[in-house]
Structures are given as structure tokens and as C-alpha cells.
Image: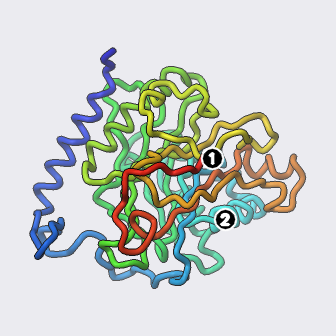
Amino acid sequence: MLKPIPAIVVAAVAGGGYYFLSNYEVKREETRIVIARRDGEPIGSPLANRPPLTDPHRLTLRLATFNPGPLDRMKLGSPLIASHLATLIRDFDVVAIQGLHGPNQGLVRDLIRHVNAAGGNYDFAVGPEVGAESIESYTAILFDAGRIDIDRSTVRTVDDPAGRLTHRPLMALFRARGPAPDEAFTFLLVNIQVDPARVEMELDLLDDVHAAARASHPDEDDVILLGNFQTDGSRSGQLARIPTLAWAAANTVSMTRGAGLVDNIVFDRRATTELTGRGGVVDLVRRLNLSIDEAATVSEHMPVWVEASVFEGGQSGRIAADEPNHLR
């Protein structure tokens, strides 16, 4: 059945196409075709404030989703909670965050300040509507700029003209630092926050969100949906119609009090061969040495994570192949 939401595909492609043609050109360099900015600056080239590469000998990345919400200024104003959240975020190289409550970027900037208080180089991406529109909550993607590059031109929220999604998914394109650019793992993250009051309807739209993300970056096969799906994957709506999609976490819980599994990472098991098979859910009680009640005060949700190689295809010099990835 056709649904109104596929208009997001058209909007993403049309808007992205105009931006692309205005700002980029396709060039042939000897045996390969590359995309470069029309001003001559290659995608992902160092900016003036780009931090040095962090831990160059570590050949893996840790990708995570974490919903510490509702996270507002009052909650983040607790030094203890802020410290615990910063500790958890620093465990990962890139984290999709849900549940941020505030009218502008001030909250996420304060969160980043706490994360970097120990000397880190974390940065963030939010949708263009944050601070420009009247909003009460939003999502963000936090990342260690010493480990990962972001293409800022790709940061956007999926357009939903019909207003079917309470929280418009945030997406951005990233590349691992360390390997040569043509060997580095590139991936498109899509941050999902399903409304608990509209679970069935919104789950049935996520296949269109996935299609819109793929259409906006047709040359990127590593499209990863991560966030709060309000399901353990056993009922995944129309996403189940994409047979190659896999859910990273299964047979476990992501709620601090053990209520169930609602947070997850969804990837294409054939395309995203960079995942190593390592991952899981971070137990806040053990990680932070807290009681269950204390841990729940920090967050009702626990981070879910996966590990990936910094190399495209999983190893240096390898091109991603159409083969299964056995991460569950």
C-alpha cells in the first residue's frame, strides 16, 4: 500500500540534488571517480580546528545509541548526573542521543562541555530546525572528532510533509579517521526516536525512512538506523520487508530497570561487513557502580553499541563484499 511518507524520498533527493550540483562536481582522477567541492576543497578535508587523530593504533570504532531522556537543563544541572553521562558517552566514538529537551542547541552544547571536560574532542550534529523552529525536544549525534570526520553538508532531518513522525529522524554521513580516505569506513547514521504513543504507525514508516536515507546518498551502502525503536525487533513493522536488515541487540534488555529491549541498532548484514561482531548493552549499575535506583536516575535507558573496523569492508585494501555479517 502506498503511504504519504515516501514524499520524504523526493524531498531528500531534490534538495540534496540542488545542493550537490551547486557545491560539488564529479572529477575523474586516473582510475577512480571522486566528488570534490566546487571551491576545490575535498570532502572531509581538514578544517582549521580539526583535532589531531586520537589513538591511531586502535583499528576499531564503537558506535552507540543512548536515550538519557528526558534530559533537560535541570537534570543536566546535577553535577553527578552530568559526570555519569559524560563517562558513558566517552566510552564510544559516535553516539546517537535521543530525549534532549530544550528550544535550542544550548543543552547539547552544555552536554558536550561536560564530555570534553576531561580533555576530549567531542563534537555534535543536530538538525537545522533546532533553534530555528519552535521545538520542545530533539535528537543529536555526538562524535569524537579525533576519531571520526563528519560531512556537515549531509546533516539534515528527514523531511516528513504529512507530519506522520513525531520526531523527524536525524541523519549525517561520517568517515573513520586514520586510514587513507579511500580505504576508510564511511557510514550514514540515522537517529530514530519512535513515539511510544504511536509505535505501530511509526514503525511502519521506518522502511520509508531507510529508503529516503539510501536515496539521498546512493553511493553509500552502509546505512545504519540506531535509536529508540520502542520494540525489541520481534515486531518491526515494514522494516521486516527488508530481509537483509538485522538488529544488533537481541535476547537482552536496554531498560535500566529491566523492563525490556527498546533501543537498538539496525544495519544491512550484507552491506555493512565492517561490523566485527562485538557489541552489547552497557549495564549502568556495573559501569557506574550504582544501585538500580541511582542508575535509573541517570538514565532509564542503557546504551546499545556495536564495534566496527575503521577500514571499508573490514580490512585494509578490501572492498566491501556482498556477504553475511553474523552479528545478532
Q: How many numbered circles are shown?
A: 2
Q: Is residue 52 left or right of residue 250?
A: left
Residue 34 visible to an observer of this rendering = yes
- Residue occupying image coordinates x 79% and y 48%: 297
Mark 1 Cα-neighbour bin, 10 Å: few <14, some 14–19, many ≥20:
many
Q: Is residue 74 visible?
A: no
Residue 298 lies left or right of residue 73; in this view the side is right
50 vs 133, nearest the viewer: 50
Q: Is residue 166 above or below residue 268?
A: above
> Residue at position x 23%, y 37% from top?
11
User: Where does the image place residue 296, in percent across and percent down from the top left?
Assistant: 80, 46
* Cα–Cα gap, marks 2 and 1: 13 Å
> Quick check: 221 above or below 29?
above
Question: Which residue appears farthest toward the top when viewing the image?
Answer: 1
Which residue matches tag 2? 86
Where disc 1 sits, the SS reads loop
Amino acid type of the residue that numbered disc 2 sits on in the rendered structure: Ala
Percent of width and height locating residue 190: 44, 47
Dot 2 crowding, Cα within 10 Å, few <14, some 14–19, many 20+:
some
Residue drawn at (62%, 42%) of the image: 263
Q: Residue at x 62, y 68 (%)?
A: 115
Point out residue 277 in the picture as x, y percentages from the top left corner: 59, 57
**Picture quadrant where residue 78 is located:** bottom right
Q: Quick one: label 2 or label 1, which is nearer the N terminus?
A: 1
Q: Identify which residue, 328 or 149, lies in the foreground.
A: 328
The location of residue 86, given as percent across then percent down, is: 67, 65
Q: Disc 1 designates what residue? A: 67
